Image (tube, helix red, strand yellow):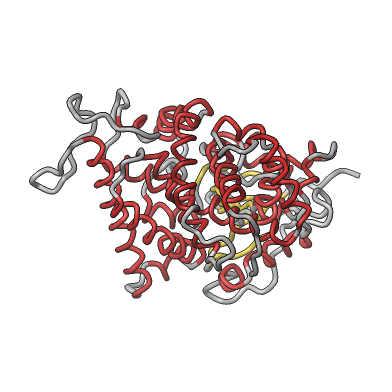
Amino acid sequence: MSTPLFTPTPTAPGSLPLIGHAHRLARTPLPFMASLREHGSVVRIRIGTAPAYVVTDPALTRKVLVTDAADFTKGGKIIDALRVFFGDGLATVADGDVHLRNRRLMQPMFNKAHIATRGDAMIDQVRSMVATWEDGGHRDVFADMNNLTLAAFLVALFGTDLPPHLQEEFTTLMPAIMKGTIRQTILPPWANRLPLPANRAHAARVARLRTLIDQAIDHHTGQLPSSTGAAAPIGCPHAARPTGLFETLLTAPEPLSRQQLQDEAITLLTGAIETTGTTLAWTLYEISQDPDVEQRLRAELASVCQDRPLRYTDVDQLHYARRVLQEAVRKYGPAWMVTRTATRDTRLGGHSIPAGADVVWSPYLHQHDPEVFPEPGRFDPDRWTRAETTAARGSFLAFGDGRRKCIGENFAWAELQIILATILQNWSHLQLTT
């Protein structure tokens, strides 16, 4: 029997007039995304009145991201919402020459050798903050992890001498901006254009963030805003030499405009907090619930570091810590909905996808597939030591895949291990509750 050219695409139940499935995405996003697997390999949902096609099969997701990437470019409702406020940073800029140029320009910032030049400075920053905690006291772990990841990233990005008032305001602004960004991405576009207090407050916070980034750049380059208020071009040969990863952009042979520098800095900051802070908070929770995991982590750390403080050269030797963190990223990775745009009428697993349609893939959905990850709700770092994990890696998509794969993956793993190891060295007992 011949295979039909096209497979009817099922529509997820529960769509409401005008808002589609936005209420499910806003209220119960993770159960909703997981439920779509029951309906087929490609499932139609509605975001507002517009249809979107959710891919639940990791093999088809790979076609979207890698083998047929030219047919599914960076875009869609989520990217459009992000672009309104964050501009054309590396994560939101459309595929093409600008993306390729900027990615090639930024790639050296995130190779392992370059990250290593900032490693010990990051450790010092994290250690100084953790040292102020009272052992055995009560902490807001989620807030602490966001503060640690942001502080470490600011040190890596801008250097060690960022004025304290800038760091404090970055720390205050970013959680509110991330919350507003999530809200913007799941609501229909028309709702985001209304003059609502939440929309105005979000826009004001992003505008303030751009001002802070300008001040951080000017602090390191010695430049002052022009008398007209417009930013002067970057690249003055007599400016003070900056430090940190951002130096790559500030000293590029073809300097980026101030707007482009802001866009890239915002992209890096939001990416650093969303993934790393959330992952660390849940990692500490899981460790606190399993004494065996905590004991193995502490034993590995003691074996590698002996009685001395952590050094950056120790990080690659913390193999069990890496497995613990990878399992936390698998189970709790915050990226649960990512979009692409179909560039032409095409087929995906036999399903007809019209040109211009949003195509959705979900790292969360793939990383909780019971056929790939048995008992996906169980926290099991040792699943990453078994032979079958070779197949599982095709469904581990926390950092994406293909030409748009997250450029900061190496940095994220380094920062995660630095912060986890530093906390364990300075915090004698973990006892967390949800």
Front residue (pair 3, 88): 88
Image point (17%, 38%), residue name: 223
Which of 173 and 364 lies nearest the eye of the viewer? 173
Residue that sits furthest to the left in the current view: 227
As drawn, the residue found furthest toward the right would be 1
Say if residue 323 shows up in the picture: yes
Residue 185 rendering spot, x and y as whole percentages: 49, 61
- Residue 389, given in percent of the width and then of the height, sits at 80, 40
Where 227 sits versus 33, above or below? above
Q: Residue at x 59, y 73 (%)?
A: 27
Task: Give the vertical position of 420 relative to 44 (above or below).
Answer: above
Name the residue located 43 percent from the left edge and 31 percent from the top edge: 106
Residue 171, percent from left and from top: 39, 57
Question: Is residue 40 among the parts visible in the rendering?
Answer: no
Horizontal side of 303 relative to 378 (left or right) equals: left
Quadrant hosting residue 69: top right
Residue placed most toward the observer, 298 or 60 = 298
Pick the quarter of the image with the N terminus. Answer: top right
Total marks shown come to 0
| Apparent side of residue 73 relative to residue 352 in the rendered image (left or right) | left
Residue 369 appears in which quarter of the rendering?
bottom right
**Image quadrant of residue 202?**
bottom left
Question: 189 or 347: which is nearer to us?
Answer: 189
Residue 85 x, y percent position in the rendering: 36, 56
Image quarter of the C terminus: bottom right
Residue lying farthest front?
307
- In the image, taking residue 379 as reference, residue 174 lies left or right, namely left
